[in-house]
Image: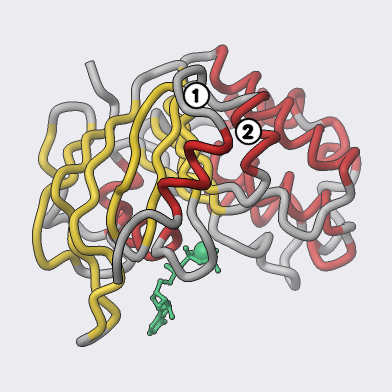
Amino acid sequence: MSELEVSGLRVAHGDLVAVWDASLDLLPGRITALVGRNGAGKTTLLSGICGLLPVTAGQVVLAGEDVTALPPWQRARRGLAIVQEGKRVFRELTVRENILLGHRSRRGKGEREVTDLYDRFPMLAQRREERAGALSGGQQQMLAIATALAAGPRVLLVDEPSSGLAPVVVDQVFDLLQGLRAEGLAILLVEQLVDEVLNGIADDVVVLDRGRVTARDSATNLTASAVAGSIYSVDP
Ligand SMILES: Nc1ncnc2c1ncn2[C@@H]1O[C@H](COP(=O)(O)OP(=O)(O)OP(=O)(O)O)[C@@H](O)[C@H]1O
Ligand SMILES: [Mg+2]
């Protein structure tokens, strides 16, 4: 069964419709890459899915439940987590305080999950009393992901986690996502590194162009050139 089913979603910034009609399906234990050029509407679509922007048509169904009318925190409680663009962490708070904020949206509470999380991120465990702003860019991205994981999600939306990071750090982020996939998480990954995700970590691909989905397939069926074709095939 789908962990997340999005159908016919329309999302606007005020009067400007940025996503017209987006549908996608996220399955447990799979990474779906969401690709498309700058301004295609990828971030807007993620915001609509998690309730940060209002949707004017369509549906978001999370683990079989229609959550389209629910506010973001209630979607989070039901297992939907987002790592927003740009390594968003609370820079003035410590690593530990950032992670506790994520943990507050968890359904059942307990210190145990936080301990497990530190086992997964020994670097964050070591630096847990430091200000998040003192971490490197890659470490802040890891903290942003760890904070999302602290809520115990079943679906994880990640917006351009590789942006601005050195290749070796990008590999670490992708390794982490692969580990999470192996544990059964359904992951939607927005990525500019199309070749890397198609030949590497993506199981499925959704192409968005000018607010519309122009291709949806498994990564093995969609070549990079077909993706490029879908990105530029729609008339304005
Ligand atoms: N806060 C906003 N207010 C008004 N318009 C916006 C806002 N954010 C984005 N837009 C517009 O919505 C459209 C889609 O933008 P969006 O940021 O979702 O694209 P994107 O695919 O994430 O691009 P990028 O690859 O640059 O991150 C663009 O035309 C953009 O100018
Ligand atoms: Mg974006």
Task: Give residue 29's position: percent from left, percent from top.
Answer: 46, 16
Left or right placement of residue 184 versus residue 68 in this view: right
Task: Give residue 212's position: percent from left, percent from top.
Answer: 28, 56
Residue at 30% over, 49% down = 213
Q: Amino acid at mark 1?
A: Ala
Q: Quadrant of the C terminus?
A: bottom left
Colour setup of the view = secondary structure
Where does label 1 land, which residue? 219
Left or right placement of residue 105 versus residue 170 in this view: left
Q: Is residue 142 above or below residue 112?
A: below
* Mark 2 closeness class: few <14, some 14–19, many ≥20 residues within 10 Å: many
Q: Is residue 150 visible?
A: yes
Query: Which quadrant contains ligand 1?
Result: bottom left
Q: Secondary structure at mark 2?
A: helix
Q: Secondary structure at mark 1?
A: loop
Give the CA distance from mark 2 to mark 1: 9 Å
- Between 198 and 54, which is closer to the camera in this rendering? 198
* Mark 1 closeness class: few <14, some 14–19, many ≥20 residues within 10 Å: many
Which image quadrant for residue 178? top right
Q: Which mark is residue 197?
A: 2
Q: Amino acid at mark 2?
A: Val
Q: In terms of sequence position, does the residue under pointer 2 or pointer 1 come before the other?
A: 2
Q: Is residue 223 above or below residue 6?
A: above
Residue at 70% over, 34% down = 196
Q: Is residue 87 above or below residue 26?
A: below
Is the shortest distance between ligand 1 and the CB of mark 1 under 8 Å? no
Residue at 74% over, 37% down = 173
